Image (cartoon, rainbow, N blue to C red):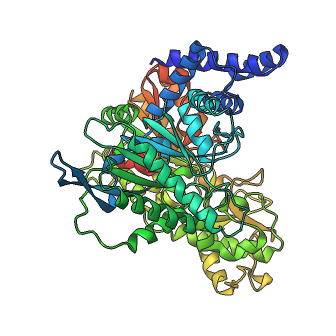
Amino acid sequence: MTQSSLSAAISASLRFLLNESFSAQQARRYIAHASHSETHAQLHMLHQLLCQRPAIPPLPSEIISAIDRVLSHQRDKKILTSAPFLPVRHSIPRTATTSDDSTQARPDVRLKLWKGDITTLTDVTAVVNAANSNLLGCFQPSHKCIDNVLHAAAGPQLRSACNDLMDAQGHAPEAVGKAKVTPGFNLPAEYVVHTVGPSLEPGSTPTAKQKAALAECYTSVLSAVESLPSDDEGRLSVAFCCISTGLFSFPGATAAGIAVSSVIDWLSAHPETRITDVIFNVFTPDDLSYYSDIFQHLEPDPQLPLTPKSPLVPPQNLRRALGWLQEADALLLTAGAGLSAAAGLDYTSPAVFNAHYAPAKALGLRRLYDIIGFSWPTPELQWGFWVRHHNTATSWPESEIYTSLLRLARAFDASPSGQDITARDVFVRTTNADNLFARHAFPKPRLSTPQGSYTYLQCLSKCRRDAYTPFAPIAAALAPHIDPATLALSDPSLIPTCQFCGGEMTLCVRGGSYFNQAPFAAGEEAYAEFLERAEENGQKVVVLELGVGMNTPGVLRWADEELVEGGEGRVKLVRAGLGPSSIVPEELEEAGLAVGVEGGCGEVVEWLVG
């Protein structure tokens, strides 16, 4: 599909849905707004409209086709995971009855555990949807439930198929513990098996009846999958989500135990099953921990097969990106928070916060992002936290993703040793203030951090251009005076002040007009020189943009696009990340100047470099 047809498909879909949902005047206003919006905003609007739209009246066939074109394009730029190559955690024997009523051994049923986005699982017969009793999907765009995720990726035909199933039973609520099958439509999986799990009051303990109902969900799904066709290689596989553990409030650890035991019991009771693979798909670290503990306590299986091949399936866009890199004369690496998250320093992660900043939870903080704009109760708490954060970020363990990127940068190096990347036109520009590039040996002359760095403090009033100082010696001096139980600085007289005016100091990170850019001016000057050299020498430049979100698009995202737009075909953009972080402007993709790859930064870098 050409990008122009994608643009037309998005436009046609939005126009129809907006005209259907609003008055003529309102629709015209929204259509005009959408026409001037970025591609990611148009797609967001489309998904919201589809989420809230009922199955009746049916969509016109041409609109269904347009929506399918959009969704298939989104699917085809994702890094997929091939189910057959996921590692096996346990196996259950199978037998087959021959014509003379004897039994014959067959390959065991393979049980697998995988943490990832179930909408990216390919080479799998069916995925399981934890549905509600209406079986029509979730109509709340803000909900991050599996029901919403699957319907969004599959498209409106999934809701239509579910509506047909409900029509057949007079739209009576679907019973808990049963299972119904629909096609997968735009999902990589062939089918979706819908089951309704028991719903609990938050914090309550499940009753014996509720536990039995959850177990029935798993066995009903297995029975339903048994009736589906195997693939050409004889595989019949199903991927279970964590049924009832989200909005339905079933305790995760208990649910995991029921899931594994009910599947093992059913497979053991059905030795002639055609099912070859059962995958337990989890999304949260807690669920991964629950299932991992269960598999570790199962009887060891010495016959588990090895899975040497990576399960990742790169999209064509990623292959195209690799070709561009191989042909390029210069590399511009731009990076946002998604790259730090891939290295473990995830600002959205409660687990990271709990591991390194747990005392600050008493202030109502749960994630590092929560400290942005936070009003600290006392300066002592503020400085204690800043010292902890400085020390955490600057001592963060080395990460394979950064060392892999350094290898990629050195591929552009003309020096015989391959160690000095300053010899070639390689440059890094990042909004991350965590200093991870510098800690992984990216040389300072090839690095710009225009949003600042935790490695500096500055005068809050910016009394002088040079009113800034390294944070490391100050943090080292303050650390012994911080209460580990509260993170508060015990002696307020130790709070740093400006050496010039005696005023307050703050982190030298962009957060308002107070930000002092002086420590980072040399990096921006070096960046400008890099661009000038590339233009003067007519170099082919690849901009590899990793994990750049929408918080400050003017710093990297839009700047990268402008480089491509003004590059006269010499500059190409590879944009990788999750969700909007992977979407490139339609006109740049249509011109063959940009590709988007949806996947974790670690997966993208692993494939490009590994």
Question: Quick check: 116 above or below 455?
Answer: above
Question: Quick check: 554 above or below 438?
Answer: above
Q: Residue 561: percent from the left, percent from the top? A: 55, 30
* Closest to the observer, 304 or 578: 304
Q: Which quarter of the figure has residue 375?
A: bottom right
Q: In this view, does 51 lie to the left or right of 312?
A: right
Question: Quick check: 2 above or below 557?
Answer: above
* Residue furthest front as drawn: 100
Q: Residue 100: percent from the left, percent from the top? A: 15, 48
Residue at position x 37%, y 59% in the image: 269
Q: Is residue 329 visible?
A: no
Q: Residue 563: percent from the left, percent from the top? A: 52, 30
Task: Please identify the quadrant where the N terminus is shown.
Answer: top left
Q: Can residue 212 be seen in this view?
A: yes
Residue at position x 31%, y 61% in the image: 91
Question: Quick check: 559 above or below 262?
Answer: above
Count numbered badges in the picture: 0
* Closest to the observer, 210 or 437: 210
* Closest to the observer, 183 or 542: 183
Residue at position x 49%, y 63% in the image: 288
